Image (cartoon, helix red, strand yellow):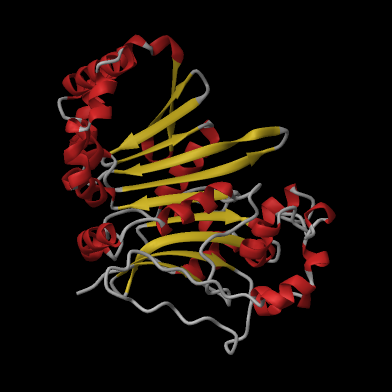
């Protein structure tokens, strides 16, 4: 059985393997670039290990359903325990202790301090860092970010769901003495469902029970999440009822190993009506990413998903707009089926392959409409 890494796209822009204007979505662009450089060997081993996990865990909460609406961005990683186990068992990780650079680092003061800190932490919590990662962070981690008027940094809400409560209970027990020492800096209230909310210096708020915890930058976000979780009546709506998020979920479906969402409507509003400029200042960026870049100005959302599709590990970009619906200026980015480039054949020893579908002549003819003056060839 053969497994491949593939980058998939939706809504009439097949062929793109990178996205966004470099100034607004550089992190997403780098993520796509990183995946295109992975070797087939890594894809085979990872896809084989993750194949049994194509469906989401039945006992995990839908975090988006208990997060307040109004988030500008959302990200979620599911079933991390298997990911971490795969990494721990990999030949790359096993070879690190014998790596000359790693050995040299641990001989430096910084390396010795890092190693001492690791040993102290492991002794305190009673488990090694690999076990901590798998048992505490190995379930589902979800994060939502909320814009704040007059402030660049958004508020954040994080929901962590561990595979079981055992490891979290150990951490709770170990943390009790430290919480007692910090009592004068801690404010405690009770939220919905009789869940205790701890506030630390009025900057960080935590509520937890059983195998889950909710961490927020404001008490209000944590309180609202507990209200939704308890099923109590409220005038507020959860994130799943935001129109762009609901459209994203309908288009992308469920069962992803990881997903990220951006409310493009909110970004456009903050940017004066567009996510990025109508004309780009770099010819290369325009040629490769101009179509996706413009789609982001015509969609209510953008999303990335990582999942398994027909036994392929697939990274996909989704937007709620079609290239065929864009003005004629942008049609060179979306060639007709007759102009499309066929996928490269899978020759023996192939590590990666990439094709680009463009009406190059059409793009050049419309360059003055697509590029800023200083970028014109």
Camera sees residue 232:
no
Is 179 or 131 nearer to us in this picture? 131
Left or right for 246, reference 359: left
Q: Name the quadrant containing residue 98.
A: top left
Is 298 or 162 nearer to us in this picture? 298
Q: Position of residue 313 (x, y in %)?
A: 33, 65
Left or right for 367, reference 355: right
In the rendered view, tell whether residue 25 sits above or below residue 200.
below
Q: Name the quadrant containing residue 11.
A: bottom right
Residue depicted at x 27% and y 42%:
211
Q: Name the quadrant containing residue 116.
A: top left
Q: For the N terminus, give its image quadrant.
A: bottom left
Is 186 or 367 nearer to us in this picture? 367
Left or right for 54, reference 8: left
Residue depicted at x 64% and y 71%:
321
Q: Position of residue 49 (x, y in %)?
A: 20, 59
Q: For the C terminus, give its image quadrant.
A: bottom right
In the rendered view, tell whether residue 283 sits above or below residue 361.
above
């Amino acid at each position: 059985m053969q497994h491949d890494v593939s980058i998939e796209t939706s809504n009439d822009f097949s062929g793109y393997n990178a996205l966004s204007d470099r100034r607004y979505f550089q992190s997403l662009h780098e993520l796509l670039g990183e995946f295109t450089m992975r070797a087939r060997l890594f894809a085979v081993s990872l896809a084989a290990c993750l194949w049994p996990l194509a469906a989401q865990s039945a006992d995990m909460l839908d975090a988006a359903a208990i997060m307040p609406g109004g988030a500008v961005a959302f990200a979620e990683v599911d079933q991390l325990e298997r990911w971490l186990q795969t990494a721990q068992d990999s030949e790359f990780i096993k070879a690190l202790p014998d790596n000359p650079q790693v050995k040299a680092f641990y001989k430096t003061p910084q390396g010795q301090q890092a190693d001492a800190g690791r040993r102290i932490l492991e002794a305190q919590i009673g488990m090694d860092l690999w076990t901590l990662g798998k048992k505490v962070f190995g379930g589902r981690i979800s994060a939502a970010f909320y814009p704040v008027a007059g402030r660049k940094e958004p508020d954040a809400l994080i929901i962590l769901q561990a595979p079981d409560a055992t490891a979290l209970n150990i951490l709770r027990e170990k943390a009790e003495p430290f919480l007692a020492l910090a009592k004068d800096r801690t404010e405690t209230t009770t939220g919905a469902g009789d869940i205790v909310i701890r506030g630390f210096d009025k900057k960080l708020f935590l509520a937890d029970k059983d195998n889950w915890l909710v961490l927020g930058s404001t008490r209000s976000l944590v309180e609202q999440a507990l209200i939704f979780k308890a099923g109590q009546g409220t005038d507020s709506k959860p994130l799943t009822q935001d129109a762009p998020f609901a459209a994203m979920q309908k288009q992308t479906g469920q069962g992803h190993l990881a997903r990220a969402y951006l409310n493009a409507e909110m970004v456009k509003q903050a940017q004066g009506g567009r996510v990025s400029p109508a004309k780009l200042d770099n010819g290369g960026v325009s040629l490769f990413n101009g179509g996706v870049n413009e789609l982001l100005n015509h969609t209510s959302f953008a999303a990335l998903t990582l999942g398994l599709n027909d036994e392929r590990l697939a990274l996909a970009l989704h937007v709620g707009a079609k290239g065929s619906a864009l003005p004629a200026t942008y049609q060179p980015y979306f060639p007709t089926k007759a102009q499309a480039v066929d996928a490269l054949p899978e020759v023996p020893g192939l590590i990666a392959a990439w094709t680009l579908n463009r009406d190059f002549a059409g793009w050049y003819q419309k360059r003055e409409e697509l590029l800023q003056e200083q970028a014109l060839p």
